[in-house]
């Protein structure tokens, strides 16, 4: 198929996630109705296990493997360059499609050229809404999270504002950044803006991407008309000072250095123009 004939390219990077990929890819087919799509699955560990799991699910699935493991951002960018769709969906392997039509999300990005990134409703394993939208982080907010503020009986007002804990997840709206479990973009625009920063080994590449899009004059939106269950692992929080914890801290420091702030982001969520945004249930 020629690139112009493909509406959506879905990129899924696995790093030992073959136990989750069957549910992820198999469920995804239900959301692709009405779309010409391709699904690119990359095995970062380069074995045969991933291909054995997903190759027989659907003819639109294409498997790739690495000779040596690479960072998530490197893998996503390489798959984006190989993809042929007008739109690009970066999807975590620990997600399972639940409801809604992806063609509706594509239609929204098609009609709103000021929005460059779109996220969906993410759900916890018990079906409750998973908070997945934030204002751009600041150093005090990151430090409070490191000290386990979400388990405290009381949290500072500025922290609650930054993590948007009163957000109505039933309404379509603009946000600063969205979780990287589901990131929908226009493919050519993503490549033109340089894709994900490959200096991040893991973590914060999603925050950084949304910030750089904003610098380019493009907004990030939340679209609850599509929902995925997300088996949020939070690996870095489970083992303090472990490998993933160190990667997380390194990525946080890189983000603040690269974006040139520690306490006050260059953009304010309070100054969004909501023109053109409508409740997805209308």
Image (tube, rainbow, N blue to C red):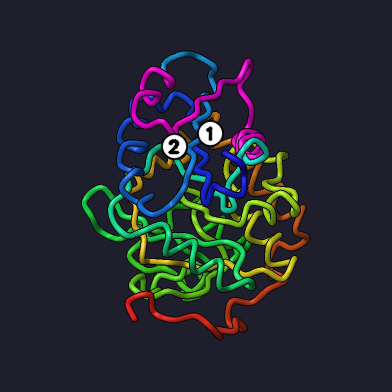
Examine the structure image and report whether residue 51 is included in the region drawn in magenta: yes
State the residue at coordinates (40%, 24%). 55
Q: Is residue 129 above or below residue 146?
A: below
Q: Which mark is residue 78?
A: none
Whichever of labels 1 and 2 marks the residue nearer the N terminus, that label is: 2
Q: Position of residue 6 (x, y in %)?
A: 54, 47
At numbered mark 2, what does the secondary structure look like: helix, strand or loop? helix
Mark pair 1, 2: CA separation: 7 Å
Q: Which mark is residue 235?
A: 2
Looking at this view, is 257 or 70 the one in front? 70
Image quarter (top left, top right, bottom left or bottom right) of the N terminus: top right
Q: Where is mark 1, residue-wise?
A: 244
Residue range of the region highlighted in magenta in the rendering: 50-79
Q: Is residue 82 above or below residue 183?
A: above
Displayed quadrant of residue 131: bottom left
Q: Is residue 145 above or below residue 55?
A: below
State the residue at coordinates (43%, 52%). 35
Instruction: Give the side of residue 55 with respect to residue 136, left or right.
Output: left
Examine the structure image and report whether residue 63 is included in the region drawn in magenta: yes
Looking at this view, is 229 or 136 the one in front? 229
- The reply to whether callout 1 and callout 2 are in contact (CB within 8 Å) is yes
Q: Position of residue 222 (x, y in %)?
A: 46, 67
């Amino acid at each position: 198929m020629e690139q112009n004939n493909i509406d959506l390219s879905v990129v899924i990077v696995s790093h030992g996630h073959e136990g989750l990929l069957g549910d992820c890819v198999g469920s995804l087919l239900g959301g692709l109705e009405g779309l010409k799509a391709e699904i690119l699955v990359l095995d970062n560990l380069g074995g045969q296990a991933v291909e054995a799991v997903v190759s027989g699910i659907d003819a639109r699935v294409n498997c790739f493997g690495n000779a040596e493991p690479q960072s998530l951002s490197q893998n996503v960018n390489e798959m984006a360059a190989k993809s042929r769709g007008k739109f690009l969906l970066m999807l975590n392997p620990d997600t399972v499609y639940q409801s809604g039509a992806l063609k509706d999300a594509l239609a929204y990005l098609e009609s709103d050229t000021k929005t460059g990134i779109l996220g969906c409703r993410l759900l916890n394993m018990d079906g409750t809404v998973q908070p997945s939208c934030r204002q751009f982080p600041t150093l005090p907010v990151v430090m409070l999270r490191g000290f386990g503020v979400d388990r405290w009986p009381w949290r500072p007002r500025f922290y609650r504002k930054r993590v948007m804990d009163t957000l109505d997840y039933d309404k379509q709206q603009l946000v600063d950044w969205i979780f990287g479990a589901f990131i929908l973009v226009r493919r050519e625009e993503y490549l033109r803006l340089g894709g994900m920063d490959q200096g991040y080994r893991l973590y914060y590449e999603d925050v950084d991407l949304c910030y750089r899009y904003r610098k380019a004059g493009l907004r990030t939106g939340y679209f609850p008309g599509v929902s995925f269950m997300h088996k949020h692992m939070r690996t870095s929080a489970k083992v303090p000072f472990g490998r993933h914890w160190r990667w997380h801290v390194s990525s946080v420091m890189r983000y603040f250095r690269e974006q040139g702030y520690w306490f006050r982001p260059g953009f304010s969520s309070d100054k969004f123009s909501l023109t053109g945004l409508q409740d997805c249930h209308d």
